Image: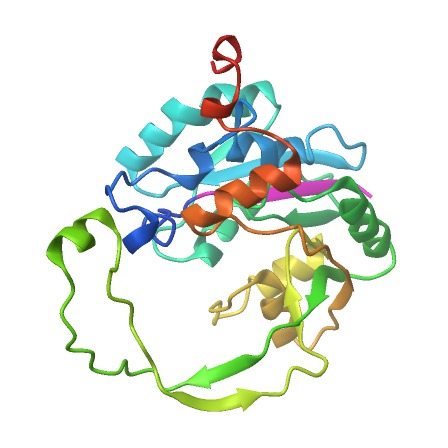
Amino acid sequence: MRISVIIPAAGSSTRYNSGADDPLGTGRSKLDEDLGGKTVLQRSIELFNTREEVAQVIVAGPHDDDAFADFKLRHADRISLLGATLVQGGKDHRYETVANALRVVDASCTHIAIHDAARPATNAALIDRLFDAAKTHPAVVPGTPVSDTLKRIDPDPLDDSSEVDPVASILGVGTRHSMHRVDSTIDRTNLMQVQTPQVFERELLARAYAQDDLSSTDDAGLVERLGEPVVIVEGDPQNIKLTRAGDLPLVRAIMGVKGPSERPTHKRF
């Protein structure tokens, strides 16, 4: 088994920089955040680049030429040192980014794994389970049982005319948040939260991406649309995706690393 790992990294970190999560409006990319002296993106690449089964790692950056040039300036040297290949991603959707990366998958690869660039805390044991399962199953994804109660809501927010102190809004304190009416409670029996990496036989993923309709929240959904089976293996609750700024301290704690301000001065650079 020879695996090509695709790491989509074309996102604009919109949720990471939204509202109270980024009160100063820094617009910082979550992939640039510091995890013990290495970026989030570098940590995600290092999950795979030295593994025996992995023949290739492809990082798919932004689509826009200017944004891609800036991405290269920030990351290309480290991506190259780690032996990964950098390509431009899609314009609007994640599936476009993966499709662009699929075009440069080495012909010798039998399988393709797709992993979120902002999921750097994946442990080696989970990757072992996935790669072992992929030897006998054409599509394998990690998942954990849903433990929280799930509510379906009315999509239209409630009108909240309460006043918010403008100074508090500027500081990100007391910022108004949308409210929605509950429509129903969802039975969580047999529901799973799916993670990455997701691993597929190369031919199967190629067929999935040859479909006309590629709208999906993950790559396994495209395989399911073909009517092909997808197998879930035990995931890891600590395999979290860095989505909002508040997730960063948790990711650091899980990985046992510190941010720059927490390290001795001579180790911050």
From the image, which quarter does the N terminus lie in? top right
Q: Identify which residue, 97 or 267, lies in the foreground.
A: 267
169, above or below 117, in the image: below
- Extreme residue toward the top, this view: 266
Is 69 on the left-hand or right-hand side of 223?
left
Q: Main secondary structure of the magenta part?
A: strand
Q: Is residue 3 magenta?
A: yes
Q: Residue at x 26, y 34 (%)?
A: 66
**66, 146: nearer the viewer:** 146
Is residue 103 at all visible to an observer of this figure?
no
Q: Is residue 235 magenta?
A: no
Q: Vertically, is 264 above or below 60? A: above
Q: Residue furthest bottom?
A: 184
Residue positioned 61% across, 23% down in the render: 82
In percent of the image, x 29 and y 67: which residue is there? 177
Q: Position of residue 27 (x, y in %)?
A: 29, 41
State which region is magenta: 1-9
- Answer above or below: position of 24 versus 178: above
Residue at coordinates 46% horizontally, 37% vertically from top-left?
31
Q: Which quarter of the picture shows residue 206? A: bottom right
Percent across and percent down for residue 134 are: 81, 55
Rendering quarter of residue 178: bottom left
Asked if residue 99 lies left or right of residue 153, the reply is right
